Image (cartoon, rainbow, N blue to C red):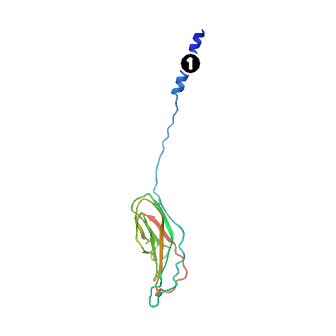
Amino acid sequence: MKKLIATLVVAVISLVAVQSASAQASATQNVSLAVNAVYKIAVSGNPGPLTITTGSAGVDALTSVSDNSTTYSITQNVGDNLKITAHMDAALASGFTLKMNLASAKGTSAGDVNISNATSGSAVNLVTGIAKGADAAKSIGYTFEADATAGTLSSTSKVITLTLTN
C-alpha cells in the first residue's frame, strides 16, 4: 500500500509539473498608427522699429533702413513643393515700400520681395519649393524705403502674416 501511495504521489507530482511547464497565457492587441499632415511655422519675435531719418540732398529716395533681428522656423511633412507667403493687414500708401527676405535651406528664397501692397487676398511668395522636414532659425530681413515726395508717415504698426502652404 505504501508503494501504491508513493507511486500515486510521484504520478500526481509529475502531472502537475508537466502541466505547469506547458501552461501559458497570451493576449493580443491591434494598434492603429497614423501621421496627419503637419504644417508648422513660428517666428522668434518682432523686428525693431524701422524709422527713416535721413536722405541725400537732390535724391528723392530717402535712406532706407533694415532689420534682420528675427528668425522663423518651419516643420512640414506634406510635400516637397510647399511655399511661404506673406501679406499685411493693410497696404502701404504710395511712395512707401516694405520688403521682406526669408532665408531657407529647404526651399528657394525669392530674395527681397515687395510686400507693400500684399494683403490677405494678394499674398506674395517669399520661399518656394520647400521640401519635407524642418528648417530652424532662418533669417527674416525687412527693408523699409520711402520717397521724399511721399511725405512723412506717423508711427504705424503693420501686422505681417507668414503662411506655410501648398
166 versus 114 height, above or below? above
Query: Residue at image x 54%, y 23%?
Result: 17
Q: Quadrant of the C terminus?
A: bottom left
Query: Residue at image x 49%, y 66%?
Result: 72
134 versus 68 height, above or below? above
* Whole-percent x, y for residue 20 in the image: 54, 26
User: Which of 41/73 is in front?
Assistant: 73
* Whole-percent x, y for residue 24 in the image: 52, 30
Residue with the mark numbered 1:
12
**SS under mark 1:** helix
User: Which of 140/165 is in front?
Assistant: 140
Q: Residue furthest bottom?
A: 58
Query: In the picture, residue 4 is in which quadrant?
Result: top right
Query: In the picture, residue 61 is in which quadrant?
Result: bottom left
* Whole-percent x, y for residue 22 in the image: 51, 27
Q: Amino acid at mark 1?
A: Val
Query: Residue at image x 46%, y 72%?
Result: 87
12 versus 74 height, above or below? above
User: Which of 11/159 is in front?
Assistant: 11
User: Which of 120/37 is in front?
Assistant: 37
Whether residue 49 can be seen here: yes
